[in-house]
Amino acid sequence: MIKSIRENKSKDASTAGEQTHFRTCNLCEAMCGIVVKHDGEKVLSIKGDKDDPFSKGYICPKATALQDLHEDPDRLRHPVERTADGWKKISWDEALDKVAAGIQSIQKKYGNNAFGVYLGNPNVHNLGGMLTIKHLLGSIKTRTRFSATSIDQLPHHIISLHLFGHMLRIPVPDVNRTQHMLIIGGNPLASNGSIMTAANMRQKLKDIKARDGKVVVIDPRRTETADIASEHHFIRPATDVLLLLAMLNEIYVQGYAKKARVNNRAADLAPEIERMADFAKGYSAESVAPITGIAADEIKRLVKEFCEAESSVCYSRMGVSVQEFGLLSQYIVMIINIVTGRLDEVGGLMFPNPAVNVVQNTGPGYLGKRHSRVSNLPDFNGEYPVAAMADEMLVEGEGQLKGFLCVAGNPVLSTPNGEKLDQAFESLEFMVCFDYYVTETSRHANIILPPVSALERDHYDVTFNGFATHNVAKYSPVLFTKPKDAKHDWQIYIELAERLDKNAPLPLKAERKLIQKLGPEFILDQGLKRGPYYGMSLKKLKKYPHGMDLGPLKPMLPEAIKHKDQQINLNVDFYQADLARVEEMMASYDESQILLIGRRHVRSNNSWLHNSHRLTKGKSRCTLMLHPDTAKAHNIEDGQAVKVTSRVGEVTINAEVTDELMPGVVSIPHGFGHGRKGVKQKIAQANAGVSVNDLTDDTLIDELSGNAAVNGVPVTLQAVAFAREDNEATVNDKVVA
Ligand SMILES: Nc1nc2c(c(=O)[nH]1)N[C@H]1C(S)=C(S)[C@@H](COP(=O)(O)OP(=O)(O)OC[C@H]3O[C@@H](n4cnc5c(=O)[nH]c(N)nc54)[C@H](O)[C@@H]3O)O[C@H]1N2
Ligand SMILES: Nc1nc2c(c(=O)[nH]1)N[C@H]1C(S)=C(S)[C@@H](COP(=O)(O)OP(=O)(O)OC[C@H]3O[C@@H](n4cnc5c(=O)[nH]c(N)nc54)[C@H](O)[C@@H]3O)O[C@H]1N2
Ligand code: SF4
Ligand SMILES: [Mo]
C-alpha cells in the first residue's frame, strides 16, 4: 500500500534522532526501493522497502554499498591535479578553468575531433547527468565519441531502430506473466537483470515454475540462474547464432510460424514472415548440433515447447550481445519472438510505457553515418565502437586523438585490450576524468573532477523505467545535503559547458542558467508532464515516496512503432548479408580451441564496487573457472596458478576447477586488475585480481555492429609451477613456468 508523506514522517519521529528515507537504489538496473535509516549525517541501515510497488522489499547485497561508497575514505571529495609530486588538491574554479583551457588548447592545435569523450555505464544511472549530458557534449563539439554501449547493448539499439523506428523502443520480457522463458546468455540471478528491469528475478523465475511454466537456460556455464531453472543446456561460446538459426528453421519446419496478431495492428508482415522461412533454411538442427554442443533432438524439443506454451518469450543478453555474431543473434531472437506471435502479447515480449517517454524526447539513432579513422568501424548514434578507441590515440595521422575526457567510466578495465588502452591514455597530451576515484583509467588524467555521492543527489530512473517489466514511477529526493564545496555531475557539465561555449546561442545560455538556478529537476517535471500518464508531475510523484504503481505492461502496437508508416520493418536484407560470415565460421570451426567467457557476481558491479570491504571480503572471486576435464588435459589443479594467453596478452590467475563450466571453456570475471601502479583504492588493491580485458582482443568484434566480442575469445592455458596463495598476479608478473 502506498503511504502518504505525513504517515512516514510520523513514523520517523518514533526514534529520537533516527530518520527514515525512501529511495531507489541506482547501482544496477533493478530499481529496488530501499529504506535508509540515518541520523541526518550518517547512514544507520539500508533495507528493502516492502511498500515499494516495484521491488516489494527485495534488495541484493550491493544496496549497502551505497553507504560504503558514501563513507569511503578513498573517495575523492574535491578536484585533484596530477603533479610531479603526486595528486594535489585544487579548487573547483581552478580545476574547471584548467580543464576548459586544456580541451581548447588541444582542439585549437589539432582540430575539434582530436579531443575524444568516453561515457561509462554509471551515466545512465544518474538523473542529473542524463538530463544535462547534451550540454557537455554539445560544448565539446567533437565527433570522436565512445561509450560502454559498444561493449554491451548496442545490438538491441540497432534492432529496435530497424524494426520499430527508434533505438530506445526496446521490448522486454513480460516475466511476471510468461509461462515459458528461454534465457540465452543472461544470468539475472547475478546481474539482477539487464534490459529487463525486474527486481527479485529469483522469485520471478520460481513463480514461473510454480504456475506450471518453464524456465530454460542456454549458457556455457551452469549459472546461478541455470541452477534454479527447469533445464539448462551448455552451449559452445559464440555459436548461439547457429542454435538460433536452427531454431528459426525448426519453427517453420514444424509449422509453428504464424500470422501473429501483431500483423493486423502493426504491418502486414505476412510476406516477410513467409520470406523468413528461407532465412534459416539449411541450418538444420543436425547441422549445428556438433558445433553448438546441443543435440538435434533437444533443439527440436526446445522449439516445440517454446511454441506450444500458452505464452513464451525468448530473452537474450550479454553472453550473446558481446560476441562475434551479437547483432545477428539478437536479431534472430527478436524474429523468433515475432514469428511465433510473442511480440506485444501478455507473457511475451512487451513494450514498457514509462512515465518519462525517452523515445519521444530523443532522436531515433542511426548506424554507420561515419566510420572510425583507423579501424573503419561504423558509428552508432554518433559513437564509435570502444574497440576502435586505443587505435584512435596510438595511430598517427590527421584526426589522431590527443586529448580525452572519460565520464564515469573505467575503460582500461572494461574494454578489450585494456593494456593497449592503458598505453594509449599514457600517450595523450591532456586527459580529464569525472570520477570518484583514482582508478586504472583516471590515474592517467591530468585532472579528476569528482561528483557528489549517490546519497547526496536526487533520483528518478529515466533510463531503466524504459526497460521495466511493470510500469512504475518514483522520485527519490536528496538524502544528505551535499557539502558546500562539492558539485553534482550536472553542475560539472554545465559549468564546463559555459566555459567552453562562450558563444553559445542565447536560448542555450539561458537554459544553462536556468538549470543552474533550479537544478535539472524541472526538466524531469517537464518530461513527466509531457508523458503518457494524465496528471503526472514531479509534485504528484513526491506524494508517493515509495513510488507509484502504473500497472502491468500493456499491448502498445501500433503506437509503439516510430516508423512514419507505423509498420514494423524486419529489414531482412541487412541481416541476411551477415550469413556469409556464419558460413565462413562453420566451414573453419576449430572445436579444440579453448574459449574464454566472462562472469558476473552479485556482490560486484563492473569495476567499481571493489573498494567495499563488505562486498569483497572472503575468498577472491577473480578466478579462472574451468571444467575438471579441461583442467586435467592441461595438468592444472584446483587453486593452481595458470598462465592464460590470448593474441593480445597474458594474465596469471588461480584456477577454480568446477563442472559448472562446459569442457573447453574458461571464465574470468571482468572489472578486476586493480594492481596497476597508481590506483588509489586500498581495499580493491588488496584483492587486485587480474583484468580479463587484458586478454580480450580489440580486433575481435561483431563486424555487423562494431560491438566488442569479449565472449568466446580463443586462449591457451599453461599451468605454472606453484600454487599461489593470493590472486594478485598482474599482467606484468613474470611467473616462471
Ligand atoms: N570482458 C568484459 N568486459 C566488459 C563486460 C563484460 O561482461 N565482460 N561488461 C561490459 C559492460 S555491460 C559495461 S556496462 C561496461 C562498464 O564499463 P565502464 O562504464 O567503463 O566501467 P565501470 O566499471 O562501470 O566504471 C564506472 C566508473 O565510474 C565511476 N562512477 C560511479 N558512479 C559515478 C557517478 O555517478 N559519477 C561519476 N562521474 N562517476 C561515477 C566509478 O568510480 C568507476 O570508476 O563494462 C563492459 N566490459
Ligand atoms: N552484480 C552485478 N550486477 C550487474 C553488473 C555487475 O557487474 N555485477 N553489471 C550490470 C551491467 S552493466 C549489465 S550490462 C548487466 C548484464 O547482465 P547479464 O546479461 O545477465 O550479464 P552476465 O551475468 O554477464 O550474464 C551473461 C551470461 O552469458 C553467459 N555467456 C557467456 N558467453 C556466452 C555465449 O557465447 N553464449 C551464451 N549463450 N551465453 C554466454 C555467461 O556465462 C553469463 O552467464 O548486469 C548488470 N548488473
Ligand atoms: S539489485 Fe541490488 S544493486 Fe540492483 S538496484 Fe536492487 S539493491 Fe541495488
Ligand atoms: Mo552494462
Image (tube, rainbow, N blue to C red):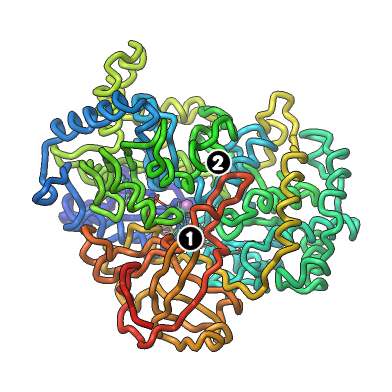
Q: Is residue 187 above or below residue 256?
A: below
Q: Is residue 674 above or below residue 405?
A: below
Report the residue marked by disc 2: 377
Q: Residue at x 79, y 33 (%)?
A: 267
Circles 2 and 1 in contact, beta carbons < 8 Å: no
Q: Is residue 713 left or right of residue 125?
A: right
Tell me which amino acid carries mark 1.
Answer: Thr
Q: Quadrant of residue 492?
A: top left
Q: In the rendering, at what x and y percent does residue 136 appear? A: 34, 29
Q: Nearer the viewer, residue 662 or 677?
A: 677
Q: Residue at x 11, y 39 (%)?
A: 90
Q: Name the disc covering residue 270, or none.
A: none
Q: In the rendering, at what x and y percent does residue 626 appear? A: 52, 79
Seen as rendered, the residue at the extreme left is 85
Q: Is residue 688 above or below residue 151?
A: below
Q: Nearer the viewer, residue 665 or 31?
A: 665
The answer to which of marks 2 and 1 sits earlier in the sequence is 2
Q: In the rendering, at what x and y percent does residue 517 appear? A: 25, 23
Q: Is residue 431 above or below residue 626?
A: above
Q: Residue at x 35, y 31 (%)?
A: 521
The answer to whether residue 345 is seen in the rendering is no
Q: Quadrant of residue 263?
A: top right
Distance between the alpha carbons at the discs numbered 2 and 1: 18 Å
Report the residue marked by disc 1: 696
Tell me which amino acid carries mark 2.
Answer: Leu
Q: Is residue 175 left or right of residue 99?
A: right
Pointer 1 residue Cβ closer than 8 Å to ligand 1: yes
The answer to whether residue 386 is seen in the rendering is yes
